[in-house]
Image (spheres, rainbow, N blue to C red):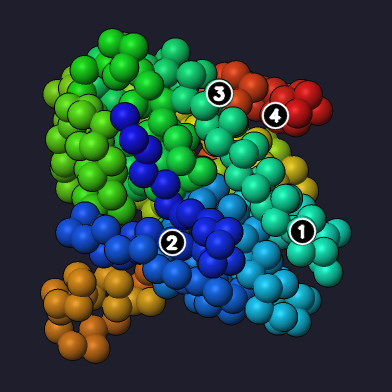
Amino acid sequence: MERTLPFRWEPAESTLYLLDQRRLPQEEVWLPLNSAADTARAIKDMVVRGAPAIGVTAAYGMVLAHIAAEDLDQAEGLLAQSRPTAVNLYYALARMRPLKGNLEGSLKEAREIWREVEETELAISKNGARVLKGQVLTHCNTGPIATGGYGTALGAIIEAYRQGRIEHVWVDETRPYLQGARLTTWELQKAAVPATLISDNMAAHFMKLGEVDQVMVGVDRMASNGDFANKIGTYGLAVLAQQHGIPFYPALPLSSVDSKLANGGAIPIEERSPEEVTTIRGVAIAPEGFPARHPAFDVTPHRLITGIVTEKGIHYPPFDEGLRNALAES
Ligand code: MRU
């Protein structure tokens, strides 16, 4: 099956093309980028989103900064400010930093970051599939277009279906930006995995009916103790899963672990425009000017996690020790 990637690099044009995720599932439009400034704007505006995909895009943004003769420190600053929560962005920029001024080296490093991301996703998918059975519920979008091209939580879910371990996926629509309704559905349809879309407030109902065997989600940033930030609504799902005795697994590359943070309390939470809550694709659903809030992520405490899936395996409590050992191995 042909993979759909979130980006492609065209060497002949020295151009980075992003699949414009704002226009999915209706249209597949590729947006050409030729500078770091444009790349930073594209990340901020959600042309590309998902922690690993943002990281790889930012690495290519630094390549474009060389080609467009932009100020390299300023370019890095713009990219670093584009979105604050996913740590993969900072991981990629730190990897690109020593190559400032070296176009060929930058290009090689960006390609290498992408290759490593792909490799880790294949391992995460295989590891995550091992714990899945029956029916799995997922939130937001963690598939090929959120990542380097294979997926994390959704990669594991697709792999589990291929292995005959699961028969059905519940897809949370993921208000307010609707990554589940627009993107996860689109990816599962392409992968021919049986799935049903539900609005976020239906999850508890299906859990109570015994129709959810486990929950698997992605991660934007995980602290050393296992607390993690992910798409708003993840914390609520973890609480519901615990109430119903349903295993709850975050799946992530180890590059999403921020080992400087002892717990999730210091993870910066992006606050996006309230208009993303009061409107849907430009159509108002609330009275004009009505106050709204849009924290784009929440933090799930590690005590609600059953196991953490990474490229190194599945880590069970105590998570701090498991993550430390896995990071030391990688
Ligand atoms: O705001 P988004 O769409 O970038 O948020 C994405 C998520 O929260 C994903 O679950 C996370 O980045 C993991 S992607 C493999």
Question: Is 191 rendered above or below residue 81?
Answer: above
- How far separated are the C-alphas under marks 4 and 2? 32 Å
Residue behind mark 1 = 104
Q: From the image, state whether disc 4 or disc 2 is nearer to you.
A: 2
Question: Is 143 rendered above or below residue 88?
Answer: above
Mark 1 belongs to which amino acid? Answer: Glu
- How far separated are the C-alphas under marks 1 and 4? 34 Å
Badge 2 vs badge 3, beta-carbon distance below 8 Å? no
Residue behind mark 3 = 123
Asked whether 244 or 134 is in front, the reply is 134
- Mark 2 crowdedness (10 Å alpha carbons): few <14, some 14-19, many ≥20: many
Say what secondary structure mark 1 lies in. helix
Q: Tell whether circle 2 marks a residue whose Cβ is less than 8 angstroms from ligand 1.
A: no
Q: Quadrant of residue 197?
A: top left
* Disc number placed over residue 323 in the picture, else none: 4
Residue at 65% from the left image edge and 48% from the top image edge? 111
Residue 198 image point, x, y percent: 16, 42
- How far separated are the C-alphas under marks 3 and 4? 16 Å
- Earlier-in-chain disc, 2 versus 3: 2
- Mark 3 crowdedness (10 Å alpha carbons): few <14, some 14-19, many ≥20: many
Badge 1 vs badge 2, beta-carbon distance below 8 Å? no
